[in-house]
Amino acid sequence: MHTMTKNARSFSRCLAVSVGPLFLALALLFAGCATPKQVSEIVVQSNAAMLAGQFGLPEPGAATGKPAWEEATDRIEAFIAAHPDQPAAIAPLRIREAMLLLNYRQSSLAEAAFNAVAIADLHTDRDLALKRSQETLLWWFANSTNNAWSATDQNKSQAAFKQLKDEQAQLNGSPEIRDYLAEMRAWIGLSAAKQTASTSHARELVEDALNVYAEIFTPDDLKMLSTGQEQLPDPKAFGPDVRRRLRAKAVLSQAQKLNKDAELVAHPKNALFDRMMNP
């Protein structure tokens, strides 16, 4: 395996876009005097800020002149301060706040938001999975675009690989968050393969990444990916299945490029993935 090249830096830039938080339709629990309108307004504002950070879009207008992420987190903090006795409403907002902060590379603040959440106060598969994945998320968002990993990063990538596989296995009833974490695991595998000096180990990482990733795709998904004839609805109407297939194309495109450039001769078990990897 060669050291990082211009192509590798391009790979890292692709990761910067692809590994940002997917748009998660966060359904929050409401309790006491915290009204659905109050929370829904926070959700809308933080969604806009999150998407702007993820895709490099213009930030939504801020009344205070602060960055969009800061104004959104200020609003979350104000809500929490006004409703300290409503942990069922506060905890999911903290998880949302952590993900927003990660998207803007505010790692220390994101860690503080995660740490403020007691897992007993979370009640959805999505929020529980994100809380359990806290260490993986904090490491990955801080290091996903680095050109070189330390020995510590290599160890953390191995831990993340195992942890995300375990999460994927127990989230089949919640496809949105399952797909999000499964895709993250695939990117971690591709990145780890890029970092190793051993061709055989890189091949194993790519094959493992894609073998586990392939498990989230239904026969209909694979048929649509095979034909390449996705009929796209209005973006606002994208369901988990459409997003899963669209994002798979980016993962498989990078996997195919890595397989070719590094001469890995990787062959994932899924027949379609294998054909796409080895055209």
Image: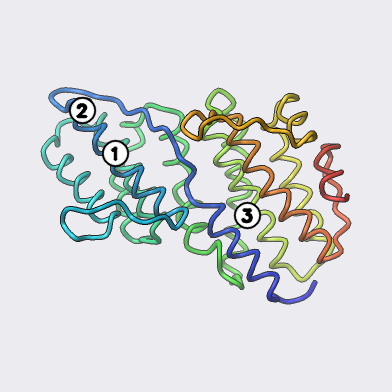
- Local crowd size for mark 1, using a 10 Å CA cut-off: few (<14), some (14–19), many (≥20): many
The N terminus lies in quadrant: bottom right
What count of labels does the image hold?
3
Q: Which residue is mark 2?
A: 37
Amino acid type at mark 2 = Lys
Q: Earlier in the sequence, mark 1 or mark 3?
A: 1
- Local crowd size for mark 3, using a 10 Å CA cut-off: few (<14), some (14–19), many (≥20): many
Amino acid type at mark 1 = Leu
> Which disc, if any, is residue 188?
3
Q: Secondary structure at mark 2?
A: helix
Residue 164, percent across and down?
59, 43
Q: Would residue 92 appear left or right of 164 to someone viewing this image?
A: left
Q: Secondary structure at mark 3?
A: helix
Q: Determine contact: label 1, label 2, CB under 8 Å.
A: no
Q: Would residue 7 appear left or right of 264 to someone viewing this image?
A: left
Q: Which residue is mark 1?
A: 93
Q: Earlier in the sequence, mark 2 or mark 3?
A: 2
- Work out how far the residue at label 2 is from the one at label 3, CA to CA, in angstroms: 38 Å
